[in-house]
Structure formats: structure tokens, C-alpha cells
Image (cartoon, grey):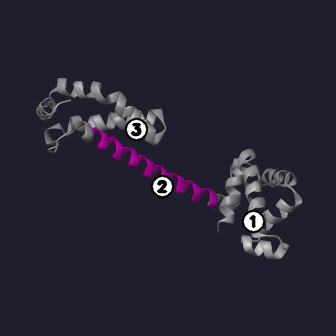
Amino acid sequence: MNKYVESNLIKELRDNSESAFEYLFKLYYSDLYSFSYSYVMNKDVAEDIIQDVFSKLWHMAKDIPDISSIKSYLYSSVKNSCFDYLKHLKVIDSNRKKLTEALIFSGTVGYETNDEIIKQVRDCLSKLSEQQRLILELKVVNGLKYKEIAEELKISEDTVHTHVKRAYKYFREYFPLLFYFIITFSQK
């Protein structure tokens, strides 16, 4: 789009021209949607972000700052909205983690009864090698570091790391909720 057309569109937007707004919407919607989707990876959220950006553009049309490119302005607005959404998700994830930890510590995990969880843990552990079970127990239950486990079992730190990695991989693939609990406790 050349600068003359763009400056006229901006002027028309400031004058609340529905046709200028509709033209911009049709011109940029699908590209902005793809751009937004590449950040948030959710169709509905990407669509909401684009709708919000265009809605704000329409409502603040009279106060549009002096800009040289409406396209750059729209892309920047979408990008900032995506980042705000992702920050919001990070806060939600952090709160969920805290809630899960609180439920675990209070003994009121609502997903299953304690007996069922203990049975699942035992079943999982029984599928690991003896060495992996021992190393995982030392790491998760006793809170030992790789170096301490290596010294206690008289094996290399790399071997400890490999066993922990394989055990975590097994839990992550077959029992994701259990894996989350194990990781949560082993990082304390």
C-alpha cells in the first residue's frame, strides 16, 4: 500500500469512516489471524485477539497516533496482545501449580483417592529397573543430588543422570499427572 493511500485511510479512520475500517479489516484480517495464531497456537484465542485489536482501532479511531504505517501498527498491536495473553497463561499455570501442591500437601487431591494414587505409583515403580527405582527414590524421596547419589551407590554422576532421565521419560509418557507430582517434589 503506498503512503498516500495509507495516510488517506488513517485520515478516514479518524473521521469514523466505516468503509475505511471495513477495507482495513478485509485487507489484514487473515494475515493478522495467522500471525496471532503463530504465537498463541489456539484458533479461538487468535480470532479473539484480532477482533479485540480491530475493535480497539475502531473505538479509538479519532485518537489514532501519528503513524507511518497502519499495517505495522496493527501487527504491533496484535503482537502485544499475544504477549499479554501468554503472560496471563503463565500466571494461570503458576497458580495451578501452587493449587496442586496445596492439594497434595493437604491430602485432598480430588482426582483420585490416595489408595488409587499409591497403587499407580507402585505399579509405575514396579516397571522400572531396580537401579532406576533406587535412584529415583534417593532423588525424589530423600532429596539427594546427583553427586550424592553417585557417591552413595558408587557409580558415576552420568549414570545417575541417565537413570533419572529414563525414569522421568517413562512417567511422563505413561502417567503425566504422576510425573508432574514427581517433578514438583524433586525440585524442592
Q: Is residue 103 left or right of residue 138?
A: left
At label 1, the amino acid type is: Asp
Q: Nearer the viewer, mark 1 or mark 2?
A: 1
Neighbor class of circle 2 (other Cα within 10 Å; few <14, some 14-19, many 20+) is: few
- Type of the residue with mark 3: Ser
Residue 83: % across, % down: 39, 48
Q: Nearer the viewer, residue 18 or 11?
A: 11
Tell me how far mark 1 sits from mark 2, CA to CA.
35 Å
**Which residues fall within the magenta stretch?**
74-101
SS for tag 2?
Answer: helix
Q: CA distance from mark 3 to mark 1?
A: 42 Å
Q: What element does badge 1 sit on? A: helix
Amino acid carrying mark 2 in the image: Val
Determine whether label 3 and label 1 are within 8 Å by CB.
no
Foreground: disc 2 or disc 3: 3
- Tell me the residue that label 2 is attached to: 91
Residue 186, placed above or below residue 53: below
Q: Magenta segment, principal secondary structure?
A: helix
Q: Quadrant of the N terminus?
A: top left
Q: Position of residue 30 (x, y in %)?
A: 36, 28
Judge left or right: residue 82 versus residue 101: left
Locate the C terminus by quadrant. Answer: bottom right
Mark 3 highlights which residue? 36
Q: Which type of secondary structure does the marked residue at label 3 adopt?
A: helix
Q: Earlier in the sequence, mark 1 or mark 2?
A: 2
Image spot of residue 128 (x, y percent) = 84, 54
Q: Which mark is residue 158?
A: 1
Q: Are marks 1 and 2 in contact (CB under 8 Å)?
A: no
Q: Is residue 91 magenta?
A: yes
